[in-house]
C-alpha cells in the first residue's frame, strides 16, 4: 500500500504574517487527520519560521522546499544547498518544476543531477514532470514524461526512485483552473508507472505519483479515487489552510 502524500508548493508567495497564519491554521485543521503525509514547501527564506511553527504544532506537517543546488557549499551565488535545507528540517525537495525548467532553462539532465545530489544527501526528491499544451495536443504526453524520468534513471539508476516522489503536472493545467480529468490523469499515471516497471516492477509499485495542476477541494476526491494517483502537489489552493486541509483529508479518506 502506498501512503498518500499531499504537498503544498507555495511558489513565490509568503510573508512572516502569512506563514504564521497559514501554518497555525493547518496545525488546527489537521488535528486528528491520519493516513496521509502532508507537506509544505514555503519559499526558502521562511524555512526557519516554518520549522518552528511546525514543531509547535506537534509535527503534523512535513517541511519541504522548492529547489536545491547541486553543491553543498562554495562559490555558487544565490543558491541553497541540501545540507542547508536539512539543517532547517526540510526533507521533501521539489525539483524540475516546469516553472524552473521554463524560466531558468533547467534541462532534464540538470534536474537529474539535482535528483542524484538530493539522494546522496538523504533527502526526498519530489520530481516534477509533465507536458506542455502543444505536446499534449500532439499526443506526446507519455513520451515527454518517459524522457524526463529516463534522464533520472540514466543518471542514478532505477533504484534511486525508491522512496522518491514523482509529481505529474501537465503544464497547461498549472494555475489555469483547467485541470486534467481524473480519468486522463489516471491514464498518464498508469503509463508512468508502467514505464518504470520496465526497469523494476518493485520500484514502480512503491513510487508515489502525485497529480498537480489546479487541484482544489472540489476535484481532489476524484483524483484520489484513481488507483495510480497517490496524492497531489498543490499550488494555489495550498495557500488557504481550509482548502489545503480539505485536499489532504480527501486523500486520507480515499486511500484508507
Ligand atoms: P496550481 O495548483 O496553482 O495549479 O499549481 C500546481 C503546481 O504547479 C504545484 O507545483
Image (tube, rainbow, N blue to C red):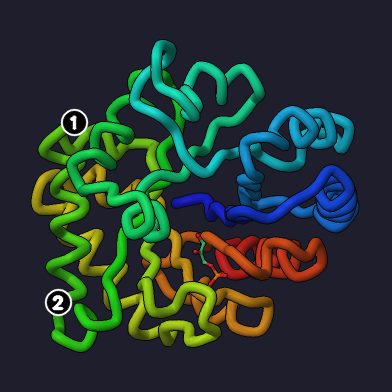
Q: Is residue 213 visible?
A: yes
- Between 103 and 97, the one lying in front of the other is 103
Left or right: residue 121 compared with residue 60 = left
Residue at 44% across / 78% down in the picture?
173
Q: Is residue 43 above or below residue 78?
A: below
Which one is earlier in the sequence, the residue at label 2 or at label 1?
2
Question: Which type of secondary structure does the marked residue at label 2 adopt?
Answer: loop
Q: Residue furthest top?
A: 74
* Residue ID for mark 2: 140
Q: Quadrant of the C terminus?
A: bottom right
- Front-most of residues 95 and 80: 80
**Left or right, 238 with reference to 219:** right
| Image position, residue 235 (x, y; %) | 59, 64
Give the left or right position of residue 167, taking residue 136 as reference: right
Q: Position of residue 96 (x, y in %)?
A: 35, 49
SS type, badge 1: helix
On residue 156, the disc is 1
Amino acid at each position: 500500500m502506498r501512503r498518500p502524500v499531499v504537498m503544498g508548493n507555495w511558489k513565490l508567495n509568503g510573508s512572516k504574517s502569512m506563514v504564521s497564519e497559514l501554518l497555525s491554521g493547518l496545525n488546527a485543521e489537521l488535528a486528528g487527520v491520519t493516513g496521509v503525509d502532508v507537506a509544505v514547501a514555503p519559499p526558502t527564506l521562511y524555512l526557519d519560521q516554518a520549522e518552528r511553527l511546525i514543531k509547535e504544532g506537534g509535527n503534523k506537517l512535513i517541511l519541504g522546499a522548492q529547489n536545491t543546488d547541486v553543491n553543498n557549499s562554495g562559490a555558487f551565488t544565490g543558491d541553497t544547498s541540501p545540507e542547508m535545507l536539512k539543517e532547517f528540517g526540510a526533507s521533501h525537495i521539489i525539483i524540475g518544476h516546469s516553472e524552473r525548467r521554463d524560466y531558468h532553462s533547467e534541462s532534464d539532465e540538470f534536474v537529474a543531477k539535482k535528483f542524484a545530489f538530493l539522494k546522496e544527501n538523504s533527502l526526498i526528491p519530489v520530481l516534477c514532470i509533465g507536458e506542455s499544451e502543444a505536446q499534449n495536443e500532439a499526443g506526446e504526453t507519455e513520451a515527454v514524461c518517459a524522457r524526463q524520468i529516463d534522464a533520472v534513471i540514466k543518471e542514478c539508476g532505477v533504484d534511486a526512485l525508491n522512496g522518491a516522489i514523482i509529481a505529474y503536472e501537465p503544464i497547461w493545467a498549472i494555475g489555469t483552473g483547467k485541470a486534467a480529468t481524473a480519468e486522463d490523469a489516471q491514464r498518464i499515471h498508469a503509463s508512468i508507472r508502467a514505464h518504470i516497471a520496465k526497469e523494476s516492477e518493485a520500484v514502480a509499485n512503491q513510487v508515489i505519483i502525485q497529480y498537480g495542476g489546479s487541484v482544489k477541494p472540489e476535484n481532489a476526491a476524484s483524483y484520489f479515487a484513481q488507483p495510480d494517483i497517490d496524492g497531489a502537489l498543490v499550488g494555489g489552493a495550498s495557500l488557504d489552510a481550509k482548502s489545503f486541509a480539505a485536499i489532504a483529508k480527501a486523500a486520507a479518506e480515499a486511500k484508507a
